[in-house]
Image (cartoon, coloured by chain):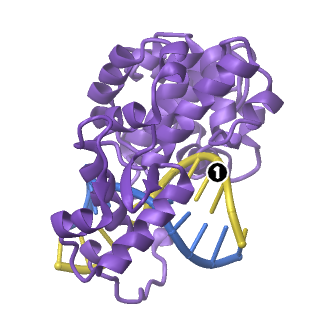
Chain colours: A purple, B blue, C yellow
Amino acid sequence: MSPIQKRLLAWYARNGRTHLPWRKTRDAYRIVVSEFMLQQTQVERVLPKYRAFLKRFPNIRTLAAASVAEAIREWQGLGYNSRALRLKRIAEAAVTKFGGKIPRDLESLRSLKGIGPYTAAALRAFAFDEDDAAVDTNVRRVVERLTLGTEEPQALVPRGRGHDWNSALMDFGATICTARAPKCAVCPLKTVCAAFPIDPPAIKSPRSKAKSVPFERTTRFARGRIIDRLRRLPPGRRVSLLALHRDLALPGRTAQDVTTLVEALARDGLVTLCNRKVALTD
DNA sequence: AATCCGGGGGG
DNA sequence: CCCCCAGGATT
């Protein structure tokens, strides 16, 4: 192993978050649930949601057999509800096409909507102990700094250590080699880092943003409120578009605006619209 | 290449 | 308050 590899794995052995539940399992279903949650949310916020989700859907067949509405309800507080839908569809595909298991080969993984290059590699490393490099923006940044861009992330994976290596890079990037204000002074890799010491002013970028719309007027806010309202609906019940508009009282939104928003959510498959009444998709 | 998605965290 | 932020799909 190279000095970088040895030092980072040694740091991880002492400082890594090896106690995290998705680090202690090789159950591909549990790994894919954690990956979908972690793509959008901080670890501390994911932990309780992860436990609750697995309690409600203990295995892939439970999730496959559930309704979309149940999956979206269990997703409450995580945001990005489309990902709950995709996770649920992946569970269905695993049961109908892959013998009830998350597939191991790259092509099969990539055929599942919602699994891109990053998540496919993460699943192969964390669930199947393959030496793939799961490259998110944190890992890309860390590797670029450590080698000044001379090495591809995949080339750095120590043979047979893909699981711990990917975990180590992520923990390191989250705590030491952070995007802004990296802690070079206490970095265990500073003596082998090509970028040490990083020049802070180099991070400055010319920013002149157009003025932003208030968050309450954004499509994102409105969609989130609509899904939240439907989530609280008793199972099997639907609500009329007019009642939805009246209940939510979204700032600056007409009844027609609400209809348009609901139609978009219906195209996404999150809600079902029938006779101007709407509910989460069954 | 740019945009959409849903909030939360940090300065 | 203001700025920044992730991965995947779509166009």
Image height of A227 relative to A165, above or below: below
Of A164 and A104, which appears nearest the observer?
Answer: A104
Within-10-Å neighbours for mark 1: few <14, some 14–19, many 20+: some
Residue A51 location in percent, x, y? 32, 20
Image height of A175 relative to A224, above or below: above
Of A91 and C4, which appears nearest the observer?
Answer: A91
Q: Residue, x 55% and y 11% (percent of image)?
A: A27
Residue A281 location in percent, x, y? 45, 43
As drawn, is A233 to the left or to the right of A153?
Answer: left
Q: Residue, x 38% and y 45% (percent of image)?
A: A185
Q: Can residue A162 be seen in this view?
A: no
Q: Can residue A106 be seen in this view?
A: yes
Of A171 and B2, which appears nearest the observer?
Answer: B2
Q: Of the residues shown, which amino acid type is indicated by label 1?
A: Glu
- Give the image quarter of residue A159: top right
In the rendered image, the quadrant that contains the N terminus of chain A is top right
In the rendered image, the quadrant that contains the C terminus of chain A is top left
Q: Residue, x 56% and y 39% (percent of image)?
A: A86
Residue A67 location in percent, x, y? 45, 30
Image height of A259 relative to A194, above or below: below
Q: Give the labeled residue for mark 1.
A: A144
Q: Which chain carries label 1?
A: A
Residue A177 location in percent, x, y? 46, 45
As drawn, is A276 to the left or to the right of A92?
Answer: left
Q: Residue, x 50% and y 64% (percent of image)?
A: A264
Q: What element carries label 1?
A: helix
Of A269 and A8, which appears nearest the observer?
Answer: A269
